[in-house]
Image (cartoon, rainbow, N blue to C red):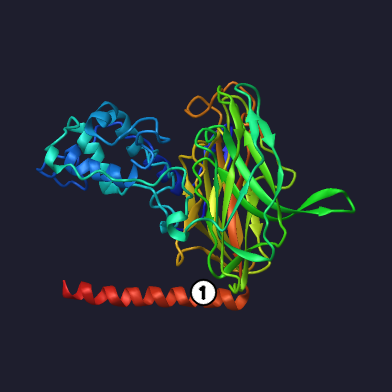
Amino acid sequence: MSQPCVRLFKAGVLVVTSALLVAISMAQPSAEPFDGTQGGQAPAAAPVTFTKDVAPIFQRSCQQCHQPNSIGPMSLVTYAETRPWARSIRSKVVAGEMPPYRYDRNVGIQHLKDDLRLSEKEIQTIAKWVDSGAPQGNPADMPPPVTFDNPNEWAFEKQFGPPDIIVKTKPFTLPARGQDVWWRPIVPTGLDKNRCIKAVSVKPTVKGRAAAHHANTEFVEFDEKTGNYVETERVSEYALGKAGEIVPPDGCRTMPANALVRWDVHYYPTGEELKNDVIEMGIWLYPEDHQAKYKQDLKLYLLTMKGGDLEIPPHGTTVTQGFHTFKTPVRIDSFQPHGHFRLVGKTLEIFYPETGKLEMVSSISNWTNNWHTSHIYADDHAPLVPKGAVLVMTGYYDNTANNKGNPDPDQWVGPGSRTADEMSHSWIAVTHLDDAGYERLKAEREAKQKATTNNVAPQRDRQ
């Protein structure tokens, strides 16, 4: 999981870590038809069919979006709806492009919350089904239809119930055509005392989802000396594909009394007028007596060094890299790359100066601007970073025709907030610990790992 790495950019040739190269190769569609074999074993004799084998996978992992009147471009509920798309489905699934959770396998931490990726076995099943002619199978094997949540419901409503507070933008009308537009209204929250946030989720309208590139929020207060509103704390960051954030119980992201929220909504016209659009943010709060020892925050961490810049020539590639360290030990709760059309990969590593060790934490080598996923680490696997260790964040950009998401490889691309520009940062949620808390969490994890090892060993002995 960890290894030293060198990144060079010479004569327009990008050289990346061996781990990332492996991840990139795994993310590409196979040139040869999938034959169902693995490790030299013969394929199973039983045929793979839609009704018995594929439909259950689609129900678990695809139909939430791919159903009538949802955000997917086609419905994948019935065999008749699915069959015309079989080859396209195979290509997207094998490439790791669908479901839209592009986190590399076998690189870095693999224990994540709300991980949408299919298992390798499920990918093999879908590929084998397509390669064998995509047969329907026995209709009697079809599982009962699944009822899904209303897409207008809040992301965490099943888990926490309705939000305690809903903060809305003022209505905004976006013309059918034009350039990037920013909408920055300031609205009150109505909260009368300081509270700790449990979770937060931003919800655009179904019609406005495609037009809302991002919707960021921050708490602000009015500075009478300057006559300006000043940010006091980041609330959330939304971009297409992100459900929201959950704050761990031992960390507090504070929502101050009488808080004002300043929205920063980036719209881009889609060819159809968006009239009186309103974006909502749901906030769930911990109880008033909730005690959290540590501060948790969400911040933007740049991948361009001081004095550095992001410039990508036509038909060229480039790399950005940023470093950050903390004055106290921290726990990294989530990692979310951000970029536009030319960003194709991003990694997060930790460098330990005392030992010279460089540890790969997360790698996304098949990134897309269409889905901005926040990768939330499982409770016992969120990276614990000692004081003095360095976060190393690396971004990979491709402005060539090989990047199929690139709208125009003939253009120079520089830094900026427009959709046509590029960005180089990551959103990272961090819980700021003290030395005692760091040692306690570390000891608890080691004890759990030891207990797990002790429980597994006797089972192996009995085999």
Residue 114 position by quadrant: bottom left
Residue 191 drawn at (x, y percent): 67, 60
Residue 253: tell me if it is visible. yes
**Residue density around tag 1, few if under 14, some if 14–19, many if 20 or more, within 10 Å:** some
Q: Is residue 453 above or below residue 424?
A: below
Residue 233 rendering spot, x and y as whole percentages: 69, 57
Tag 1: residue type?
A: Leu
Dividing the picture into quadrants, the one containing residue 30 is: top left
| Residue drawn at the location 68% of the way across and 37% of the way down | 183
Does 305 appear above or below 138? Answer: below
Q: Which residue is mark 1?
A: 441
Residue 441 percent coordinates (x, y):
51, 74
Return the residue nearer the eye: 373 or 362: 373
Locate residue 8 relative to residue 378 in the image: left or right.
Answer: right
Q: Quadrant of the C terminus?
A: bottom left
Residue appearing at x 60%, y 24% in the figure: 314
Residue sitting nearer the eye, 90 or 243: 243
Image check: 301 left or right of 246? right
Count the marks. 1
